[in-house]
Image (cartoon, rainbow, N blue to C red):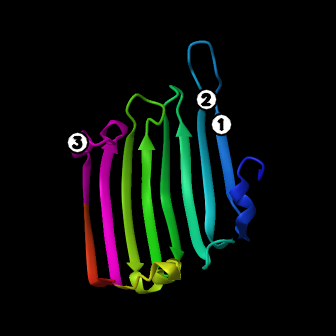
């Protein structure tokens, strides 16, 4: 695997990813496909990345489905990543993945401590950060909405809040 993804050589984890799949039906010349359900779970676990100064704690539960018409969807029912000063939680999905205009659903929360994240900045930058930042993003959008002139068509709501933010 490292031949194709050389960065994986820098990753160390005790995480165990489990997957199970059920396939019911058959393929035929009329375009019928079997029902396919694949569930993937990565329990919350620590990941070490050699060039990153802190452990990364992450977990995920996801499901991929394809029905007899070939329509595919994917859902992340639980996803999260945490490290020193940063916490991101996300749920979401994509409807009709291979369709003409897939719909994307997202529900995400983020919290960042700028004081703790300061350690990730090189000392040579001489930047001091303080305060905290929280953000939320919820809603749906079509893949065709991802672009400068169509993003306003997306049905997204969100907020960003800062407290005591100082950058110098």
Q: Which of marks 3 and 1 is nearer the N terminus?
A: 1
Residue matched to label 3: 153
Q: Circle 3: is it few (<14), some (14-19), or many (20+) Cα within 10 Å?
A: few
Q: Name the residue under label 1.
A: 23
Looking at the image, which is closer to me, 81 or 39?
81
Q: How far apart are marks 3 and 1 (CA)?
A: 37 Å
Q: Which of 59 and 121 is in front in this view?
A: 121
Q: Does the magenta stretch include residue 155?
A: yes
Of helix, strand and loop, which one carries label 1? strand
Residue 142's x, y, as percent? 33, 40
Residue 163 lies in quadrant: bottom left
Cα gap from disc 2 to disc 1, whole angstroms: 6 Å
- Location of residue 164 by image quarter: bottom left
Percent coordinates x, y for residue 44 in the rendering: 60, 71
First-in-chain label (3 vs 2):
2
- Is 112 on the left-hand or right-hand side of 5? left
Q: Do the residues labelled 2 and 1 touch (CB within 8 Å)?
A: yes
Q: Is mark 2 on a helix, strand or loop?
A: loop
Q: What stretch is highlighted in magenta?
A: 131-157
> For this view, does 107 lie left or right of residue 125?
left
């Amino acid at each position: 695997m490292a031949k194709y993804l050389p960065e994986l050589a820098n990753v160390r984890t005790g995480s165990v990813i489990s997957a199970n799949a059920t396939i019911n039906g058959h393929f035929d010349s009329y375009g019928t496909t079997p029902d396919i359900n694949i569930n993937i779970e990565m329990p919350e676990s620590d990941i070490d990345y050699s060039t990153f100064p802190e452990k990364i704690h992450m977990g995920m539960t996801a499901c991929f489905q394809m029905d007899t018409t070939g329509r595919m969807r994917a859902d992340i029912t639980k996803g999260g990543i945490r490290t020193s000063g940063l916490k991101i939680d996300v749920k979401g999905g994509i409807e009709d993945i291979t369709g003409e205009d897939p719909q994307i659903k997202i529900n995400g929360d983020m919290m960042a401590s700028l004081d703790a994240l300061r350690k990730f900045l090189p000392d040579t930058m001489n930047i001091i950060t303080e305060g905290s930042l929280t953000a939320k993003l919820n809603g749906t959008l079509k893949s065709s909405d991802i672009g400068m002139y169509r993003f306003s068509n997306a049905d997204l709501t969100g907020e960003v809040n800062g407290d005591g933010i100082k950058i110098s």
